[in-house]
Image: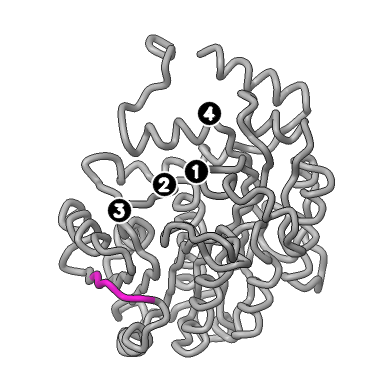
């Protein structure tokens, strides 16, 4: 074990942190090692969480479909699709799935198309360049009639006095892209959604907007992480946002970044949302299970708000005791875990100093 890994282990043990690492889910990304390529901006932790939510949404939908419905194509639309990884992960599981991906970034469609060819999935994919706010995007989605919409959008609040790169900034409250995706959802009405967002940008408001469009939060993945290149650059601005939840306590910062590099910690979220009434259709049904506790009829948006407020107040221990009326999976991603995840997808597979272990 490397010295840094030993230090991280000891630091977490001293704080009695028993959250699983998000790396426990990294097996989901094994098919996307090089030569799979990524577009200009790629955040592996966000993408991994979104894959988890997409898997959960896909599983719930396929369990609720009638035998007749299983014989038809399963249409997936991925907004802000980048490399196409999340949508392609569904196609690898479901031979009836077809993917339509949209991204405003110039080269993203070409990168995703090459990835589809690499995975021998190009006959079931189509990628295009499009802005979420364009009328063309809405028309294409209405024509596609997806059963599942996936969106892992930018989420960093953008100070009005500055202009972040297109792939990072998401308006003054960090919700511009996710709320636009939910507007499209309300108009297109897929059976399910897999969405990513975070505690920096009105996290409960995102869930409330989905509920207002007719969708119930079925499964939530929450991961504590240290500030990054973009989020860290707006740290003073975040402190003034009323619906932004961060933790700056020394114990929390040591847990997420034992090298002392973190200024704050926040929560990444991804969720599987199911349209109301889908479970009432005839066909096989499954009981929803949860790794978290339930609180009866508690509103999902209120539950997410409480998770964020408790984390901002008490740090990682709050996630260990979090409760919710939906399936809840809480985890931790340290700086070391981030590095290992990036190495897995961009380079050689072993940690420094682990040869022969």
Q: CA distance from mark 4 to mark 1?
A: 15 Å
In the image as oriented, which residue stretches furthest toward the front? 161
Looking at the rendered structure, the secondary structure element under dot 1 is helix
| Direction from residue 321 to residue 191 in the image, left or right | left
Q: Which mark is residue 39?
A: 3
The one nearer the camera, 280 or 25, is 25
Q: CA distance from mark 1 to mark 3?
A: 22 Å
Say whether disc 4 or disc 2 marks the residue closer to the N-terminus: 2
* Residue receiving disc 4: 336
Q: Residue at x 74, y 35 (%)?
A: 252
Looking at the rendered structure, the secondary structure element under dot 4 is helix
Say whether disc 1 or disc 3 marks the residue closer to the N-terminus: 1
Looking at the rendered structure, the secondary structure element under dot 2 is helix
The quarter holding residue 244 reads bottom right
Q: CA distance from mark 4 to mark 2?
A: 19 Å
| Direction from residue 187 to residue 75 in the image, left or right | left
Q: Which residues are magenta?
A: 127-131
């Amino acid at each position: 074990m490397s010295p840094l890994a030993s230090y991280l282990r000891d630091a977490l043990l001293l704080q009695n942190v028993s959250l699983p690492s998000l790396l426990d889910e990294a097996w989901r990304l094994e098919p996307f090692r090089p030569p799979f390529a990524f577009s200009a901006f790629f955040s592996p932790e966000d993408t991994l969480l979104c894959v988890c939510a997409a898997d959960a949404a896909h599983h719930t939908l396929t369990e609720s479909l009638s035998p007749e419905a299983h014989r038809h194509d399963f249409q997936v639309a991925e907004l802000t699709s980048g490399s196409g990884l999340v949508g392609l992960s569904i196609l690898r599981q479901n031979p009836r799935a077809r993917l339509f991906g949209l991204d405003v970034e110039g080269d993203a469609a070409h990168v995703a198309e090459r990835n589809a060819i690499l995975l021998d999935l190009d006959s079931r994919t189509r990628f295009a360049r499009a802005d979420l706010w364009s009328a063309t995007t809405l028309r294409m989605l209405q024509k596609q009639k997806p059963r599942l919409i996936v969106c892992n959008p930018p989420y960093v609040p953008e100070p009005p006095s500055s202009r972040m790169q297109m792939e990072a900034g998401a308006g003054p409250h960090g919700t511009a892209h996710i709320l636009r995706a939910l507007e499209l959802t309300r108009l297109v009405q897929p059976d399910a959604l897999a969405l990513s967002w975070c505690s920096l940008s009105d996290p409960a408001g995102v869930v409330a907007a989905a509920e207002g469009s007719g969708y119930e939060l079925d499964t939530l993945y929450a991961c504590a992480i240290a500030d990054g290149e973009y989020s860290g650059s707006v740290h003073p601005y975040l402190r003034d946002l009323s619906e932004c939840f961060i933790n700056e306590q020394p114990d929390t910062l040591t847990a997420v970044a034992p090298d002392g590099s973190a200024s704050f910690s926040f929560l990444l979220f991804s969720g599987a949302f199911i349209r109301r009434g889908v479970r009432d259709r005839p066909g096989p049904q499954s009981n929803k299970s949860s790794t978290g506790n339930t609180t009866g009829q508690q509103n999902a948006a209120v539950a997410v708000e409480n998770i964020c407020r408790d984390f901002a107040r008490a740090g990682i221990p709050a996630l260990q005791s979090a409760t919710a009326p939906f399936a809840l999976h809480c985890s931790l991603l340290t700086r070391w875990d981030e590095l290992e995840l990036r190495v897995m997808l961009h380079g050689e597979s072993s940690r420094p100093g682990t040869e022969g272990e």
